[in-house]
Each structure stands twice: as C-alpha cells, then as structure tokens.
Amino acid sequence: MNSPYDAAARLARTALSVRGDRTCALPPLLALTDPMRQPDPVALAGILPPGSGLIYRHFGDPDRLAIATAAVARGMDRGVVVLVSSDLDLAIRSNAAGVHWPERMMPQAARARARGCGMPFSGSAHAPSTLARANRAGLDAVLVSTVFPSSSPSAGRAMGPLALAAWARRTSLPVYALGGVRHTNAGRLYGLGMSGVAVVGAIRNEGPTRT
C-alpha cells in the first residue's frame, strides 16, 4: 500500500504540471486541514513535499495558537508554506506565511489589505460573483469548488473541469481547483489556466496516515 508521502509527492508533481502561466505567490499544491479527514496539521506539514502549501483551518480550536505555531515550525523545516484560515492575528502570532479567507470573510480580507497587510491571501469561491469580490479585496489566489464529485458534507454539485476553466477566464486572479481532486483526476485540469490544485482528503485517502 502506498504511503501518504508517495501520495503527496504524486499530487505535487501533478499540480506543477497543470500550473498555468499566471503568476502566483502560493505553491501549486495546497493541502487543507479538516477535523475529520485531515485533523493533524503538524503531521500534514511533515508529509507534504518541499514547495507545497498547507492551510490550517482551526474552526475555533482552543489550542489553535500552539497548533499553528507547531505547524509553521514543521513547515519551515520541510520547506512547506503554512497559511492560517480566518484569523489574521493568529497568522501573525504563529509566524504563518499568510491567511486563507472563507468566502464569507472577504470584507475582513479587504480591511486587512486596506490597513497595509502585505502577506499572501488566498480565499474560497463558491459562486462566480465571488471572483470580483476577491479581486477587490486584494487576494492573491482563489480556491474554486466543487470541481469533481466529493464526499465532503459541505461539497456542492461538481462543476467539472470545463466549467472551472470558464470561471478562470472571468478573473485575472490565480485559480486553484478544489473539491474531489486526486492525482488520478488532476491531470484533467491540464491546459485550463489553473495555477494549482487544493486538496483535503486526497493525501489521507491515498494511503495510511502516520498521525
């Protein structure tokens, strides 16, 4: 059975191969934590290959500062960029590289940019109208979902690669494909203008974890 290290390496290679020519401040492979499918950001930072990115979604965990700080430290050792979701102060205190903003928090991202925050920002987009909001908010990239069928409880109906490409043509921002992405289907994104792929359960589901 393949190890999660092998799965992560395959995804990183595939993400790099589908990356288009849009300049992006973030790596081509972004892995998001999840309370059920990928609950340990420190372990995930140790699995991801150098040159990848990790988004720590803390969901209000009371130990989020300690966890974020440990994940950032592990990421620095591994050459993995770590972003913190939803919380600029947490990102600053943990020395994270940047912030990932859920779609509903675009106004907070815009205010942070207006105050002069220059760290990388990514954001989630579940509707085409969000692309313009993300651009106005000063985001560096958007994670568009849901691309492929996904078992996530929060996943919407899969749009498919061609619809995703149409979304990408509506914005100058770098676009990442999120939702049901695995190394077995990520190649379908080649040549569609993506800047990379974002995954949640793919690395864990490809093989046994060591968390």
Image (cartoon, helix red, strand yellow):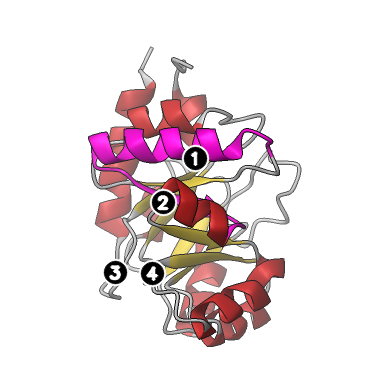
Which of disc 4 and disc 2 is earlier in sequence? 2
Residue to which mark 4 is pinned: 192
For the record, the magenta segment spans 61-87
Against 46, residue 155 (above or below) is below
Categorize mark 2 by other alpha carbons within 10 Å: few (<14), some (14-19), many (20+). many
Q: Between label 2 and label 4, give the one nearer the viewer.
A: 2
Q: Are marks 2 and 4 in contact (CB under 8 Å)?
A: no
Q: Distance between the residues labelled 2 and 4?
A: 30 Å
Which of disc 2 and disc 1 is earlier in sequence? 1
- Give coordinates of residue 2: x percent, y percent: 36, 17
**Is residue 66 located in the magenta-colored stretch of the structure?**
yes
Residue 68: give its label: 1
Residue 78 appears left or right of 120: left
Residue to which mark 2 is pinned: 96
Amino acid carrying label 3: it is Gly
Residue to which mark 3 is pinned: 20
Q: Between label 2 and label 3, give the one nearer the viewer.
A: 2
**Is residue 207 located in the magenta-colored stretch of the structure?**
no
Categorize mark 4 by other alpha carbons within 10 Å: few (<14), some (14-19), many (20+). some
Q: Do the residues labelled 1 and 2 touch (CB within 8 Å)?
A: yes
Which of disc 3 and disc 4 is earlier in sequence? 3
Q: Between label 1 and label 4, give the one nearer the viewer.
A: 1
